[in-house]
Image: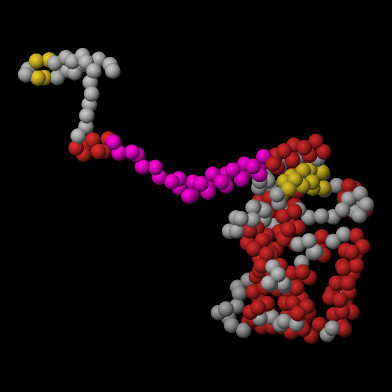
């Protein structure tokens, strides 16, 4: 114990004490002094933030190591932001009427062959006609066609777009012969159905002035008619509520192709919703032939 000096007034005299002191609290003050501090469990939100941050940093480290290993083998370029890369810029460019500036700007900075990072992967863009001819001519021998892993996941292992070689040529020829050739359209009497769908769509624009759209996007309407005709040809379902519901899910799946591939547990993102649609339509309890054949 240390010497403690008390300066105060007692009987109008200064009192000085130099001794070992022992202080005892009584009453309510003593109970509060003896009470142990309460420990509260950590906030669930904080725990979730820590876990998500850990996953993000782990993924960034893994991609950085993979990027550094391949950096010396790729053309010059820029990978943009972490995880996102330049995906947002690419999507924004292709939603405009003139997407070419995205390519032109990088060609000026890096040359006709440049590296970027889109849809979760490092990607090489080529604006060199000679190089493009060489790559296309060597397909199936020196190079092979593929899609980013985020898109391949949504397409599925048995998609026509992921088939290669003789199997791809056979399936491609079979589908064109049965579904899209002029002979198939003529022999299957599709022209009357096409005419009926087009007329019904035109009538829907003018049947009710209050509900008719002020602006019509012909490309969107053409895609809608094509989808309805494909469904009718495959499973003999005419356009209606079920077909429209299926088309909305199909469009959501397509939006997932052109979105940032965040982890699947982030179900509220565009890619997460697309994965949910894919899982629903490919589950054993819900086999959907449309997804297998259209994509």
Q: Would residue 273 be seen by someone viewing this image from the given angle?
A: yes
The residue furthest left is 11
Q: Residue at x 64, y 63 (%)?
A: 276
The residue sitting at 82% across, 38% down in the picture is 73
Would residue 233 be counted in the magenta stretch? no
Which quadrant would residue 26 be assigned to in this image?
top left
Residue 244 drawn at (x, y percent):
65, 75
Q: Which of the 4 quarters of the picture holds residue 246? A: bottom right
> Can I make out residue 222 in this image?
no
Q: Position of residue 18 (x, y in %)?
A: 21, 14
| Residue nearer the viewer, 147 or 111 | 147
Which percent across, then down, holds residue 68?
74, 37
Left or right: residue 142 versus residue 295 is right
Q: Is residue 19 above or below residue 190?
A: above
The residue stretch that appears in magenta:
34-61
Q: Quadrant of the C terminus?
A: bottom right
- Measured as percent of width and height from the top left, residue 202 is found at 68, 80
Residue under the image location 21 percent in, 32 percent down = 25
Q: Nearer the viewer, residue 155 or 136?
A: 155
Question: Is 266 placed left or right of 124 in the picture?
Answer: left
Residue at left offset 90%, top offset 60%:
165
């Amino acid at each position: 114990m240390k010497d403690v000096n008390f300066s105060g007034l007692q009987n109008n005299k200064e009192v000085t004490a130099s001794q070992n002191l022992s202080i005892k609290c009584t009453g309510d003050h003593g109970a509060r002094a003896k009470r142990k501090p309460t420990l509260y469990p950590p906030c669930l939100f904080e725990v979730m933030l820590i876990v998500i941050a850990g996953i993000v940093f782990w993924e960034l480290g893994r991609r950085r190591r993979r990027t550094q290993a391949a950096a010396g083998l790729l053309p010059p370029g820029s990978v943009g932001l972490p995880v996102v890369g330049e995906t947002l810029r690419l999507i924004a460019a292709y939603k405009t009427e003139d997407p070419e500036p995205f390519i032109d700007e990088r060609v000026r900075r890096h040359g006709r062959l440049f590296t970027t990072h889109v849809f979760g992967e490092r990607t090489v863009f080529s604006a060199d006609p000679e190089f493009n001819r060489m790559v296309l001519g060597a397909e199936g021998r020196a190079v092979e066609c593929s899609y980013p892993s985020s898109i391949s996941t949504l397409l599925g292992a048995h998609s026509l777009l992921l088939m290669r070689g003789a199997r791809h040529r056979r399936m491609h020829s079979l589908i064109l012969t049965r579904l899209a050739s002029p002979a198939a359209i003529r022999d299957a009497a599709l022209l009357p159905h096409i005419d009926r769908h087009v007329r019904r769509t035109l009538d829907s624009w003018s049947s009710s002035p209050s509900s008719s759209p002020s602006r019509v996007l012909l490309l969107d309407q053409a895609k809608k008619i094509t989808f309805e005709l494909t469904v009718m040809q495959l499973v003999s379902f005419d356009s209606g509520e079920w077909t429209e519901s299926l088309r909305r899910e199909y469009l959501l799946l397509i939006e997932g192709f052109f979105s940032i591939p965040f982890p699947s547990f982030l179900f509220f993102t565009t890619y997460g919703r697309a994965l949910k649609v894919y899982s629903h339509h490919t589950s054993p309890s819900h086999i959907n032939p449309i997804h297998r054949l259209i994509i």
